[in-house]
Image (tube, rainbow, N blue to C red):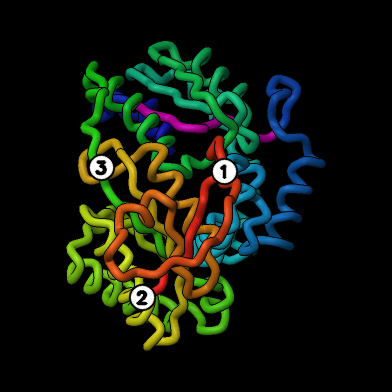
C-alpha cells in the first residue's frame, strides 16, 4: 500500500521508508528469489497447524529462538494478534501481491532497510526494490531477524530513519550511570493465560502491573519498561531493590500470581529513559535462571548489602547466555 500510495500521490508523499519489504514474495521466472509453490504451501500449513506456539520464531527471530521467556511472549503475541485461519489468509494474500510494475513510477526519496540474513524475506527483495526505485537508498543491516525484536535492533532502525529524514544521527556516548537492575516475570504465564482466557488474563495482568508499580514506588524504584508480563526497574540502592522484589512477590501472591526475579548492580548506558549495556543483559539472564518465587542476585549485589540483614543461599556458579565468564549467583531471603 505504501508503494502504491507513493507512486500515485507523489505530491502528498515526503518520503518512503521500507523495512524488510518486497514487491513480490512468490517465485516467478523473473523473481527467482521468491518462495516456490512448495515453500508457500509448507509455510501456510505450518501456520495453520502451529500458530500460537511460536513455531515461526526460528524464521522471524532466530536470535531469540532459544530464549524460553521470549518464546512464551512471542507465542502469546501470536494468539492475541489473529486466529490461525486469519494468519494463514494473510500469508496467502502476501503470496498474491505483485507490485513490481509500480516501482519505476516511484519518484520520491526512498529508504530501504533490510537485514542481510533475513530468513522470512530474503535480502534479494530489498536489493530488487533498490534497483527499481530510482531515488532510493538501500541500507543492509547485519543480522538474521525479520522482526526487530530487541531494543538494540529498534534503536538501529530508528537511527537510520532519523539520519535519512534529518541528515543527523543520534548522539553517541550516552551517559553512564551505576544502577541496581531488577527484572521480574510471571511464572507459567502462558498456561495461566490459556486457563483464564483473554479477558480475565488481561484483567489479572492489569492488576499485576498496578500492584508491582505500587511496590516499586514505595521502595524508590523507577520503572524502565514493561517486557511482556514482567518489569524492568532500576534502583539507586541494592537493598531497597531486593526488598522491593520481595514486596512485589508478596503482593502478587495475594492474587494468585507467582513471579521470579533477578538483580544485578552495574554501570549502564542512560539513553533517554531507557537503560542499556552488559549489566542490563546480565540482570535479565539472572532473572531467567530464577525459580518460582525466587529472588536471585549477583555477587555484586550481595556484597553491597552486607550488614542489611538480608540472607543469601549459595546458588553456585552459572554460565549465562551471552556472558563470557560464569557468574556466581545467590538466592536472597528476607
Measured in 3D between alpha carbons, the distance from the residue under mark 3 to the one under mark 2, in whole angstroms, is 24 Å
> What residue sits right under mark 2 in the picture?
334
Residue at left 73%, top 27%?
28
Query: Closer to the camera, 156 or 324?
Result: 324
> What residue sits right under mark 3 in the picture?
178
Give the vertical position of 72 relative to 130 (above or below). Answer: below
Residue 285: x and y in percent read 50, 51
Query: Per the image, is 18 magenta?
Result: yes
Measured in 3D between alpha carbons, the distance from the residue under mark 1 to the one under mark 2, in whole angstroms, is 26 Å
**Residue numbers of the magenta segment:** 16-26
Label 3 CA crowd tier, 10 Å (few <14, some 14–19, many 20+): some
Foreground disc of the pair 1, 3 = 1
Residue at left 22%, top 73%?
214
- Is label 3 in a helix, a strand or a loop? strand
Looking at the image, can residue 306 be seen? yes
Residue 200: x and y in percent read 43, 83
> What residue sits right under mark 1 in the picture?
326
Residue at left 17%, top 63%?
220
Most common SS among magenta residues = loop
Label 1 CA crowd tier, 10 Å (few <14, some 14–19, many 20+): few
- Is label 1 in a helix, a strand or a loop? loop
Whichever of labels 1 and 2 marks the residue nearer the N terminus, that label is 1
Amino acid at each position: 500500500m505504501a508503494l502504491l500510495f507513493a507512486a500515485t500521490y507523489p505530491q502528498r508523499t515526503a518520503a518512503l521508508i521500507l523495512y524488510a519489504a518486497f514487491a513480490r514474495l512468490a517465485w516467478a521466472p523473473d523473481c527467482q528469489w521468491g518462495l516456490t509453490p512448495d515453500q508457500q504451501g509448507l509455510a501456510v500449513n505450518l501456520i495453520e497447524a502451529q500458530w500460537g506456539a511460536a513455531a515461526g520464531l526460528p524464521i522471524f527471530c532466530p536470535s531469540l529462538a532459544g530464549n524460553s521467556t521470549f518464546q512464551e511472549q512471542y507465542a502469546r503475541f501470536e494468539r492475541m494478534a489473529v486466529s490461525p485461519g486469519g494468519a494463514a489468509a494473510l500469508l496467502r494474500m502476501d503470496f498474491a501481491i505483485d507490485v513490481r510494475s509500480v516501482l519505476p513510477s516511484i519518484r520520491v526519496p526512498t529508504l530501504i532497510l533490510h537485514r542481510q540474513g533475513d530468513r522470512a524475506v530474503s535480502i534479494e527483495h530489498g536489493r530488487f526494490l533498490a534497483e527499481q526505485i530510482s531515488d532510493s537508498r538501500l541500507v543492509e543491516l547485519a543480522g538474521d531477524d525479520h522482526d526487530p525484536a530487541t531494543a538494540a535492533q529498534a534503536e538501529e532502525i530508528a537511527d537510520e530513519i532519523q539520519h535519512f529524514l534529518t541528515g543527523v544521527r543520534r548522539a553517541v556516548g550516552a551517559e553512564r550511570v551505576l544502577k541496581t537492575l531488577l527484572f521480574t516475570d510471571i511464572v507459567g504465564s502462558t498456561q495461566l493465560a490459556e486457563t483464564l482466557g483473554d479477558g480475565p488474563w488481561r484483567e489479572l495482568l492489569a492488576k499485576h502491573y498496578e500492584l508491582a508499580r505500587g511496590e516499586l514506588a514505595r521502595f524508590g524504584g523507577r520503572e524502565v519498561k514493561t517486557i511482556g508480563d514482567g518489569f524492568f526497574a532500576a534502583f539507586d540502592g541494592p537493598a531497597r531493590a531486593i526488598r522491593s522484589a520481595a514486596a512485589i512477590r508478596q503482593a502478587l501472591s495475594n492474587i494468585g500470581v507467582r513471579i521470579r526475579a533477578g538483580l544485578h548492580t552495574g554501570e549502564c548506558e542512560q539513553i533517554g529513559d531507557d537503560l542499556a549495556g552488559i549489566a542490563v543483559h546480565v540482570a535479565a539472564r539472572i532473572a531467567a535462571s530464577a525459580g518460582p518465587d525466587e529472588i536471585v542476585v549477583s555477587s555484586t549485589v550481595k556484597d553491597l548489602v552486607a550488614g542489611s540483614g538480608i540472607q543469601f543461599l549459595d546458588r553456585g556458579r552459572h554460565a549465562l547466555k551471552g556472558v563470557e565468564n560464569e557468574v556466581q549467583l545467590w538466592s536472597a531471603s528476607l
